[in-house]
Image (spheres, grey):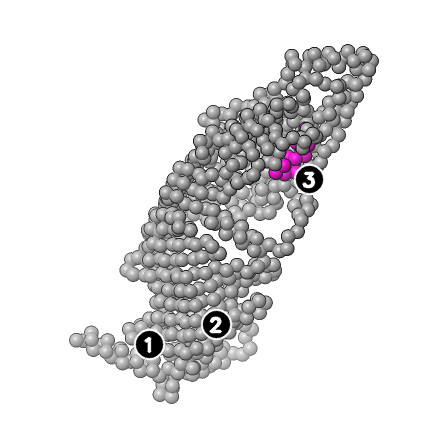
Amino acid sequence: MVLISILGIGGLISWYAVSSINTGALTKFLSSTVKDATGRDLTISGPVSLTFFPSIGLKAEQVSLSNAQWASDSQMLSLKQVELDIKLLPLFAKRVEISSISANGLVLHLQSNKAGQDNWDLSPPSIVPSGPADSVNAKNSGSTNALTSTAATAKTPNTATTDTSSGESNFVAITSIHMSDARISYQGVGNAVQLITVPQFSLEGGGSKTTVLLDLQYENYKLGLRGKTSALRQALIDWDQSPVNMKLDFNLSLNGKALDITGQIDKNPKQLPQFDLKMSSKSFDLIPLAAAAAASASTNAKKPVTPKKSEAKYFFSDQPLPFDLIPEASGKVTINIAELNVPDQAPFKNLQASLLFKGDILELNSMSFDLGKGQAQAQGVISQFNSASPLLSMKGMAKGFTLEQIIASTNSNAKVSGGNTQLAFNLSGRGKSLHQMAASSNGALQISINNATLDSKLLNKGGDFVITVLDAVNPMRKKTNNTILECAVAYLPLTNGMIPLKNSVGVETDRLDVALSGNVNLNTEVINIKIDPQEKSGITTGIDLGGLVQLVGTLQNPQVGVSKEGVVNSAVSIGLGFLTGGISIAAENAKSPASKRQSCTAALHSWTSIYPGSN
């Protein structure tokens, strides 16, 4: 009975306190508070109502917050309706703690400008003091008094003043969030608006658990998240103050394909978080993510402009890689997906991988997958990713694939048959961009292709560098629809960004035996490659057309040059032919079949020397 009496008295007090509040004055007070804190205008044009005991409920309709002055839309956000549940007891300690938020009809406009400003930056504006502190306190007291009716004006002005240090606790105290029918748009600099709809989102705290529900849609791509975790509110309160142990059990769906995410996160004060997460799925689809990214890129694109070769300075981009997105943590993520669908590629089967986070080191251990009849495996390490020169090391192999299988999976209309393919690599490099890494790279890479029939359409898609090489080797190739490839081997050793080519690249077709020599400097991307094609028939006129040609320029802008050495050699050969009445040329023709070159055999190195166990 005593407890009931206390509660009854508390209810009466609450009723009296709430009923004495003038909602119009409350609206003005909230608006002025937001204005002082953010410099933005909070407008409540709909009705405002209050409930009381055991907590105070605030309900408002037609709420909006003004945008940054430079933004396109006048309002940054608007809400059809919002409800706040404010805890009662903390008010007596001059604290405002919101236990739950419910919002309906959110429209949120996010935007960035050329100056690097974001309109969601609500940092308080700089205030230059214009008078003694007492005048500021008096102003606050006046605003507080305006909240009460005439019957409550006898209260001490400062009783409603909240402790500014409790700002963060307002949100930490939230145990439940419910949102429905939300529309979130974002516009980057010079880009079109991208729209994401959120039909429903909720975080529901209860006891030691928090239940999560999210439905999100971008164009035709739907993402869903369901599951539960340890109490988020308590984790936020204890984070870096007391030991935190969070268990996760989620199901992520992407256009109907599900991925289970389970595990736990441990955080001790003043230490990196530790985690052990597992991701597993019978079938998951990355195609919607790639398609959404492509749609975003096409939406952001301006009117189509024919690209110029000079627009990009390097073949390997010098744009910084997003190393800053890698979290500095301690933990492990294990991936086990029976079938992973990726864009323009046959599905990866039996994908298994392990990611280890060790401070500023990220290791990819024992990644493996099947693709058709082939298998691939790889390892990699990114270290010092917070430094000015991160180190990337990677090695791997792939075998059992065919070029036909790879091309067919890209939905190309080029026809390819056969082409047994094997690849091995062991590379390392330093830098913030692909160009810096390539310029400092060390290691080796080797690829071989055997017995394939190639459509000319495929060869023409190889880019400027490949097309320039092909045209230099065989200027008549455009008159044929197919190329019979017997073998192709490229062994590329790298030392500080230099690739020397000496009997390490060979190509054999049904008509030609081609060897490349020279070097490539990945720092400057300057190329100097001599091309040496030989007719397999062995018949020669004394003029080595291939020997007259070399590739110069850069990887981004390759050009065909003239080999001075080839010109001299051909001139000597022709001169000897004239002097000997053609006897020397006839002798060369007779000798050629007996000394037939095998460029592929000469170029091929031991697979195990690059990646152990790759044979």
Main secondary-structure element of the magenta-colored stretch: helix
Quadrant of residue 63 within the rendered picture: bottom left
Q: Is residue 601 above or below residue 102?
A: above
Label 2: element kind: strand
Q: Position of residue 437 (x, y in %)?
A: 58, 39
Residue visible at 37% across and 71% down? 84
| Residue 208: % across, % down | 29, 57
Q: What is the spatial separation of the Cα atoms under label 1 and label 2, in whole angstroms?
A: 22 Å
Q: Is residue 43 above or below residue 493?
A: below
Q: Image check: 316 left or right of 551?
A: left
Q: Which residues are magenta?
A: 459-473
| Image coords of residue 498 (percent x, y) | 63, 32
Residue assigned mark 3: 557
SS label for mark 1: strand
Numbered disc 3: secondary structure: loop
- Where does label 1 land, which residue? 51
Q: Is residue 505 above or below residue 234?
A: above
Q: Are marks 3 and 1 in contact (CB under 8 Å)?
A: no
Neighbours of disc 3 within 10 Å: few (<14), some (14-19), many (20+): some
What kind of residue is marked 2?
Ser
Q: Residue at x 49, y 71 (%)?
A: 65
- Foreground: disc 3 or disc 1: 3
Q: Earlier in the sequence, mark 3 or mark 1?
A: 1
Q: Nearer the viewer, residue 201 or 21?
A: 201
Q: Residues within 10 Å of mark 2 (few under 14, many from 20)?
A: many
Q: Which residue is mark 2?
A: 64
